[in-house]
Image (tube, coloured by chain):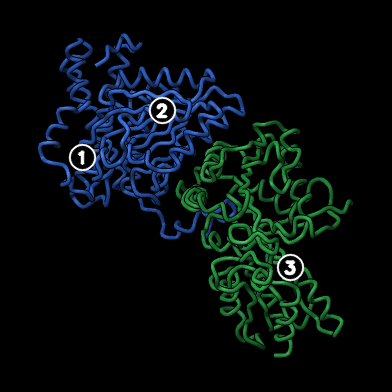
Amino acid sequence: MRDHKEVGLTADDVKEMYRTMLLSRKMDERMWLLNRAGKLPFVISCQGQEATQVGAAYALDKEVDVLSPYYRDLALVTHFGMTPLETMLSAFAKEGDIQSGGRQMPGHFSKKANNILTQGSTVTTQVLHAVGAAYKFKIDNEKRVALTTLGEGSTSQGDFHEGLNFAGVHKLPVICLIENNEYAISVPAKLQYAAEKLSDRAVGYGIHGERVDGNDPFAVYEVMKKARERAINGEGASLIEAMSTRLTAHSSDDDDSYRAIEEREKNKEADCIAHLKKYMVENDIAEDSWFVEIEDELKVIIKDATKEAEAAPYPKAEDALKNVYEEVNNG
Amino acid sequence: MAKISYLQAIHNALDFEMGKDDDVFILGEDVGKKGGVFKVTDGLQEKYGEMRCLDTPLAESNIVGTGIGAAMMGKRPVAEIQFAEYILPATNQILSEAAKIRYRSNGDWNCPMVIRAPFGGGIHGALYHSQSIESIFASTPGLKVVIPSTPNDAKGLLISAIRDNDPVLYFEHKKAYRLLKEEVPEGDYTVPIGKADVKRSGEDITVITYGLCVNYALQAAERLSKDGHDVEILDLRTVYPLDKESIIVSAKKTGKVLLVTEDNLEGSIMSEVSAIIGENCLYDLDAPIMRLAGPDVPAMPYSPPMEDFFMVNPEKIEEKMLELIEH
């Protein structure tokens, strides 16, 4: 792992990063439990990718920068301001769900107040939305950056190419972060692309490209911080490939049987949260008692959020007719 | 008031809105330095700068998708797709994204964007330069689809589309560009989206149509009026969502309805119009609903006899009108 001080982070920063990563992991684990208990129809996970997401989010200015995320980004949106209650209201499809009012499956993040663009399920469309937002920042001369994220499978889509090409032509303040966990559901990276590194594709778009260890939040932070500086200094877009690890099946409807047990066990050794904890202990950033405290605090937060969301009302059936057009709000 | 063409009216609407609102910008292929392959955006780059009348790379999904991103951030992009058929690479961005942004975010986000595209035949454009594509989009709630038939409507509807807070597809008939001319008010006025318009009031039969066929139907009605036939022509103007009330009122008024589109017959806008009339006006009808449309072949051919065979024209409409009148 990179040294946190060398990349410009304090001990308090490291603690906050750890807390967000752990909060996201624990929420994710709780949603799996609720799914297996028959209370939630669907879960899609961030587990294993928290270091990439929090490292990236930490390098941005969440007051002004915009996210165009993909479905694994629970830790990314949590750092940007999505609360545990909001996550749980979405998971339970309740009326108060800020992301979609109970319309979308969980994992389709959206929250205007936190600069999180709404996303659909047809992958890679979000890349163009980030590029379009960045074009706005350029026309209006605003010092802001748009971050879009995607899995490595999504790099096979046309929108990936079209968006990065356009971003390159206009030197747009956009960062495209590939969270490469080497599987698109069951299809392994070797059947997805032949390039040695996906970040090398940046050359073809005339933008900066770089690969980074996605299990190291400090390394991701460092690369992203520089990408953001280039973006707001008019030096254009960046394509960052974070090599990361998917610790769960694709979703709660997938059994992960296409990956050998040995491979799945080995992935656990790469668990970014375990690695960060070890680093924090070894570098005297936090003592054992701090970790116990944090675990206890998060347990309460998640329990309360779950309880409140479960007890919250569903949307009214006729709410299905709302928000089709601005002027037709009551069906 | 000056007499201007349908094309000039569209140009004037763009110019007026760009002058009025700095958030309005145009993006598309060849729209900047060249001023568009049909010259609709001529001079706008010179007037408003490269960034506000942008020549994009040749990639339609990018044109629409980046427009959506900018629109979510508060801009009012007007994307031009060079020919209507070329919109297909962008359909995922239109149907899966633009149309659903307000709904799927429960009103938290919206997408105030216009996508313009020239459509329609009779200009020796063959496959890929003659087609009607509105039916692809006209069953997707969240979208609005407008098709003006006159210079007046062209300007007023485009201003409405740009000011609308939801995505609007604006299809302009390329044969109408220089064919249709009339006096058009200068400056600010709007034509409401979602409202059909009686272009000719009559008692004997109702013709419901849109686009260039409105002009063709007016020519046919004028000829028949000399023989004492009184034809009402209802211009849909917005083909999605349809103005059901105006359709029902006009169908009940005459009791005989002819539906005209230059799109293929089956599954066209007129199929839905026919259903609306069938559901609401059955006991007011004095004849079966009639439809005149292109044949169900994949597209309009190049060779003149085949192109004429496909295309609706005033003579074909007149013949159908008479058939219905005499029923």
Query: Circle 3 — which element?
Result: helix
Alpha carbon of mark 2 to alpha carbon of mark 1: how far?
Answer: 26 Å
- Tell me the number on the disc at residue A248: 1
Whether labels 2 and 1 share one chain: yes
The chain that hosts pointer 2 is A
Q: Do marks 2 and 3 share a subunit?
A: no
Secondary structure beneath disc 1?
Answer: loop
Q: CA distance from mark 2 to mark 3?
A: 51 Å
The label shown at residue B214 is 3
The amino acid at mark 2 is Leu
Amino acid carrying label 1: it is Thr
Residue at position x 35%, y 20% in the image = A221
**Colour chain B appears in:** green
Q: Label 3 crowding class (10 Å Cα cut-off): few <14, some 14-19, many 20+?
A: many
Q: Is residue A183 above or below residue A145?
A: below
Return the x and y of residue A42 as percentages of the image width and height: 27, 49
The answer for which chain carries disc 1 is A
Which residue is rendered at x = 67% and y = 31% of the image? Answer: B50
Q: Which chain is blue?
A: A
Query: x, y percentage for residue B44?
Result: 73, 38
Q: Residue B60: give x, y in percent of width and height.
A: 54, 45
Asked whether B250 or B54 is in front, the reply is B54
Read off the residue under disc 2. Answer: A239
The residue at the far front in this view is B303
Judge left or right: residue B26 versus residue B9. left
How much space separates mark 1 and mark 3, taking CA atoms? 59 Å
Q: Residue at 67% across / 41% down in the picture?
A: B31
Q: Is residue B54 left or right of residue A97?
A: right
Work out whether residue A111 can be spotted. Answer: no
Quarter in which the C terminus of chain B is drawn: bottom right
